[in-house]
Image: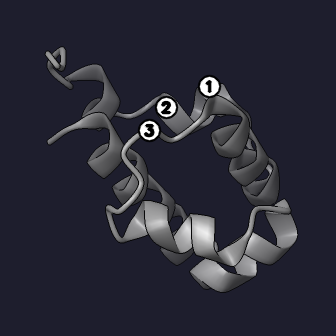
Amino acid sequence: MNISEAVAGRILELCRENNITVNKLATISGVTQSTVNDIVNHRAKNIGIVTIKKLCDGFDMTITDFFDTDVFRTLEQEMY
């Protein structure tokens, strides 16, 4: 799993936990629907930290809470 897949999975997990759709998340976070869809459908490879911060604001959570999961702790370094 790479970082963009992990971010996409985390967003979908949080949407389920908060009982909101991806489209609702886009609306409440101020991120375009197409951007959020690109992230969760693995079309976005370089997701900016500003975008992630806006999504965290939409979830009413800190960016630290967003990344505080085993998935992110165990990601291997990506070599490009």
Mark 3, secondary structure of its residue:
loop
Q: Is residue 5 left or right of residue 19?
A: left
- 20, 2: nearer the viewer: 2
Q: Quadrant of residue 61?
A: top right
Q: Is residue 43 or residue 67 the one in the foreground?
A: 43
Q: Is residue 19 visible?
A: no
In whole angstroms, how far apart are the C-alphas of marks 3 and 2? 16 Å
Tell me the residue at 79%/59% (across/down).
58
Pointer 2 residue: 67
Label 3 is placed on what type of residue?
Asn
**Circles 1 and 2: CB atoms closer than 8 Å:** yes
Does 24 sit above or below residue 17?
below
Q: For mark 1, what is the residue?
A: 64
Q: Position of residue 49 (x, y in %)?
A: 63, 31
Name the residue carrying label 3: 46
65 relative position to 5: left or right: right
Between tags 1 and 3, which lies in front?
Answer: 3
Residue at 60% in and 64% down: 35
Q: Which percent across, then down, holds residue 5?
A: 28, 50
Residue 16 in view:
yes
Mark 2 surroundings within 10 Å by alpha-carbon count, few (fewer than 14), some (14 through 19), many (20 or more): some
